[in-house]
Amino acid sequence: MKPRIQLAQVSHRYHERRVIRDITLDIFPGERILLAGSNGSGKSTLLKIAAGLITPWKGTCRFGRAPKAQRPFSGFGYLGHELLLYRGLTVHQNLGLFSKLKRSPLDLEQVLQQWDLSDKKHRILNELSRGERARVALARSFLGSPRVLLLDEPTAHLDTDGVALLRSHLAQISEDTVVVLSTHEHDLFRSFSNRVIILHKGELQFREREDQLATKRMFDVCATRRNLQTGGQEINQ
Amino acid sequence: MRAIFILFQKDLIHERNSGELILVSVTLCLLLGTLTAFGLREAVLAPEAIDRTFGTLVWLLFLFSGMLVSVRLLDSDLRDSAYQALLLSGASPTQLFLSKALFGGILLLALHALQFAILYIFLQPTFSPQILLFFLISVCVVCCFVSLSLLLSAIAEHSRLKAVLFPILLLPVLFPVFFGALSTTQDLFLNQQFDLTSFWVEALPALALVYLGLGVSLFEYVILE
């Protein structure tokens, strides 16, 4: 099977600070990846590189069989720390715009209903709460049945209902779809993922496929490291 | 073409909802036009002096209001990185640039026409304005202006000195266009001439094409990290 996303010796830096170091990674169709790591470990940057929103300082990132990297990769569903929505448009206008561009066959009313946004569809985004906006951003990233879904801390700002909606949508997506999910709430998505990747200071520290025991051990290591770090110590493995 | 139309429609709807760009630009345009016209009337200039300065005044006002409007053309797209969602949805940077240039161009042409009308009504120059030919000159100048300002405002966006950096970058590159606009307008208004073989009449459309081409080819590198 050919990988859908190929990262080859990718490094990236912001000014003098190196945030990603020599990451080589193949992501295959159908993989559900849980991307873990402490704050500042490079998770968001890695997702942006994978979406083609950032050109890596070194190395290459390719999508599918494209002969050369074309950026950003159209047809990706991406949710980042920023909303990637127009604050001056209504919920309906925002989703309608991206739906038209993606030529999504789905009825917009249905999408609004699925994300429990029907009663807010005529409200300008600026008038919504941060949590409601996050839900619109999620609806946007799921539009058009993307082949790759990159979600950077999708539960941030969501209430319990929002998290439940997200989990039910993740459960319904096509088996072929690649999902990379960066989160600190490991327990919520542990059963969903079939591969775990841990980043530490920009380096790949752990990758495992469908090995629940190893995954469990890895989470324990993560938790221990976090506890020790908050105690003022740091582990260097 | 479909994507350009969708993006253009998005800009229109955004303006209809917020009105932030049109409101600011029309207010500014009315203020600048009326104040300049009243100021000159108070100075009791001779009709001959008004005729001589009219073209310069029209383009100076366009330059001031155009800069203040065009620096904000990309604001809605850059806020919350909304343009990234457009690109991820299949729109190309070129389509984004062309739709913005179309929207900005129409807006600037409308403002330019409004300012021209205000100055013409208040100052009452003695020549006949030859609207159609003046419109053609204006289209070329607006095309250059919008292409350059979109490119440079995206560059200046990453600077903390955006408001200062933008005119510093724009004015030197725009100088030949502005000079050509003044020269052809003066010829048109004062001498009632529009010589198709004159240097500036040939240079303005060429510059418009060059700047538009530059914008199309470089915009991608300016907006993507």
Image: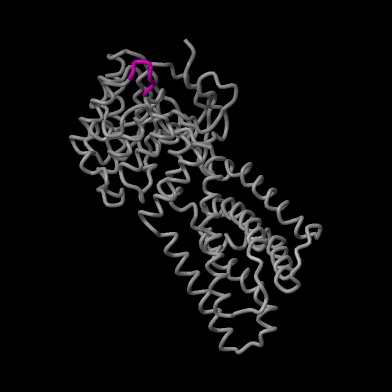
Percent across and percent down for residue A118 are 22, 39
Q: Nearer the viewer, residue A220 or A60?
A: A60
Q: Is residue A56 visible?
A: yes
Q: Residue at x 34, y 24 (%)?
A: A34
Name, please, the residue furthest toward the top: A1
Percent across and percent down for residue A147 are 41, 22
Q: Is residue A227 visible?
A: no
Q: Is residue A25 above or below residue B43?
A: above
Q: What is the magenta range?
A: A174-179
For the stretch drawn in magenta, what is the main secondary structure?
A: loop
- Magenta run includes residue A175: yes
Task: Name the quadrant of the C terminus of chain A.
Answer: top left
Q: Quadrant of residue B59?
A: bottom right
Percent across and percent down for residue A70 are 56, 29
Image-based side of A10 in relation to A128, left or right: right
Percent across and percent down for residue B225 are 53, 41
Q: Is residue B184 above or below residue B83?
A: below
Q: Is residue B33 above or below residue A125?
A: below
Q: How is the image coloured?
A: one colour
